Image: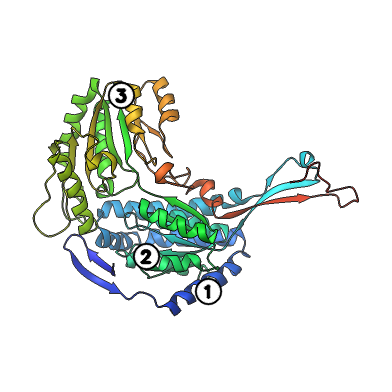
């Protein structure tokens, strides 16, 4: 795939880049390693001042950065501005809380026959980040902010269709004051990832992307004995029970399915509705979905812009066509528009069955699958009946059901009476084929730290002899 900015509104290639040579790539890794040796010796306060400076730059240049993201991958300008603001907030969050997250954690010294015992969190070195195009700034910042604050350095292999956003991030961290090489964008194709991860100077990797890409990264990292964090696909359930506020649920469902033009791993995709409220929800949901305005993402009144790539739009259309050809019913949308740009209308499909692709596959576009169930148990069985487990939603005002959903939904997150989203304050990640490890919160910072045990004894002749061998 060429490294290029292609406007998804027009399909026009705006700017292209030559991939780095082997010599350039080696030099970038070397600078990241040298920067790590420097960065690990700086104080948390110093790193925090640099990260706050990065937040200042993001806020000051928000509109320009947002315009670039919209041009490269098609999200609405309003959504892009909100993404920049969220990234600045995440920088400030880690600048503020890193000292707390990285503080030594005392242990029971007496229990382990020590005078002092504690856990210390220390950086591990350059970390490779393989990132997707759908949230081209946020996906990177939620790795980079905690990693840099911990004293690691970052090597970014971004998606090939957002090269300008990737280069902008490197420039922001450089201008904020981080040492040269602390954060480097690698303009390379996916074929270079194995070589990068095999380099002994690179100590770990994080990937947000497809299940196929995750398996590839995990295989390489396993061979190299290197840590990975994987955030992969999702087919998140959105369960609506009889006690729910149906109109509010339908309103939130519309946003949950069509945020980022429907291209979000944690977007609700399978809408599982109890029979008692199914008809009311289906009518309200289809009405709201069909009322969304499709168009130029730079316009203020646009709700849904184009999909990021032509291939992605064609894949979404193929999944809908497959369902229709096998007997599914389309309540709204479902027809690929004629004309330039990679647009696809908000679509609701029902009467789905296991023989259709939409039943088991993630649909990465503004297409919702609607399912009718007759009980809580049937809802849980269907919600958990995929290989994925990233996010989940449940709508119920019954306190007992709320507690049951929190326990029974097999996912990395359960949001009750609200839309799944990510916050710097909460850990983010999945289970099963949605990946492993966590981003954000303290857990996201600790993923790329050496969790070091420190045991200190008295130093006398009888000290340090444990009761048991390993």
Q: Quadrant of the N terminus?
A: bottom left
**Residue at 40 percent of width and 45 percent of height:** 434
Residue 426's tag is none
Q: In x, y percent, where is residue 176?
A: 48, 66
- How much space separates mark 1 and mark 3, taking CA atoms? 55 Å
Q: Is residue 200 above or below residue 337?
A: below
Q: Is residue 32 above or below residue 411?
A: below
Secondary structure under the numbered disc 2 in the rendered image: helix
Secondary structure under the numbered disc 3 in the rendered image: loop
> Is the Cβ of the residue at disc 2 closer than 8 Å to that at disc 1?
no
Q: Label 1, on which residue?
A: 30
Q: Residue furthest right?
A: 461
Q: Is residue 383 above or below residue 76?
A: above
Q: Residue furthest bottom?
A: 23
Q: Label 2, on which residue?
A: 190
Whether residue 404 is visible: yes
Colour style of the rendered protein structure: rainbow
Residue 241's tag is 3
- Which of 376/13 is in front? 376
- How much space separates mark 2 and mark 1, taking CA atoms? 20 Å
Which quadrant of the view contains residue 159? bottom left
Q: In x, y percent, where is residue 39?
A: 58, 66
């Amino acid at each position: 795939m060429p490294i290029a900015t292609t406007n998804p509104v027009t399909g026009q290639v705006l700017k292209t880049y030559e991939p780095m040579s082997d010599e350039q790539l080696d030099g970038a890794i070397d600078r990241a390693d040298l920067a790590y040796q420097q960065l690990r010796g700086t104080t948390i306060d110093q790193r925090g001042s640099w990260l706050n400076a990065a937040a200042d730059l993001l806020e000051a240049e928000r509109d320009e950065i947002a315009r670039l993201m919209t041009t490269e991958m098609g999200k609405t300008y309003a959504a892009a501005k909100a993404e920049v603001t969220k990234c600045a907030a995440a920088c400030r969050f880690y600048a503020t809380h890193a000292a707390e997250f990285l503080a030594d954690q005392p242990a029971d010294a007496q229990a382990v026959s020590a005078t002092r015992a504690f856990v210390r969190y220390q950086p591990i070195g350059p970390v490779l980040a393989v990132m997707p195009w759908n949230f081209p700034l946020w996906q990177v910042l939620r790795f980079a902010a905690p990693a840099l604050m911990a004293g690691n350095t970052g090597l970014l292999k971004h998606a090939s269709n957002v090269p300008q956003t990737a280069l902008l991030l490197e420039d922001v961290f450089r201008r904020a004051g981080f040492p040269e090489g602390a954060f480097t964008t690698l303009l390379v194709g996916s074929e270079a990832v194995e070589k990068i991860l095999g380099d002994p100077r690179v100590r770990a990797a994080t990937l947000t992307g497809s299940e196929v890409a995750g398996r590839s990264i995990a295989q390489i990292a396993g061979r190299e004995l290197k840590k990975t964090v994987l955030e992969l696909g999702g087919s998140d359930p959105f369960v609506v029970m009889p006690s729910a506020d149906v109109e509010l649920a339908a309103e939130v469902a519309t946003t949950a399915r069509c945020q980022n033009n429907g291209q979000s791993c944690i977007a609700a995709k399978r809408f599982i509705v109890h029979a008692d409220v199914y008809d009311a929800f289906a009518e309200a949901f289809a009405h709201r979905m069909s009322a969304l305005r499709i168009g130029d993402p730079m316009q203020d009144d646009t709700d849904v812009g184009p999909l990021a790539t032509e291939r992605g739009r064609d894949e979404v259309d193929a999944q809908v066509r497959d369902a229709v050809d096998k007997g599914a019913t389309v309540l709204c949308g479902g027809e690929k528009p004629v004309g330039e740009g990679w647009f696809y209308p908000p679509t609701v499909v029902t009467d789905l069955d296991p023989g259709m692709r939409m039943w088991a596959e993630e649909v990465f576009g503004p297409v919702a699958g609607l399912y009718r169930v007759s009980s809580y148990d049937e809802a849980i069985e269907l919600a958990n009946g995929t290989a994925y487990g990233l996010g989940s939603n449940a709508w119920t005002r019954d306190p007992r059901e709320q507690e049951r959903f929190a326990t029974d939904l097999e996912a990395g997150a359960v949001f009750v009476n609200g839309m799944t989203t990510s916050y710097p304050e909460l850990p983010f990640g999945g289970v099963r084929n949605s990946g492993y490890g966590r981003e954000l919160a303290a857990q996201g910072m600790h993923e790329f730290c050496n969790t070091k045990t420190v045991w200190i004894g008295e130093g006398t002749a009888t000290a340090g002899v444990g009761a048991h061998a390993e």
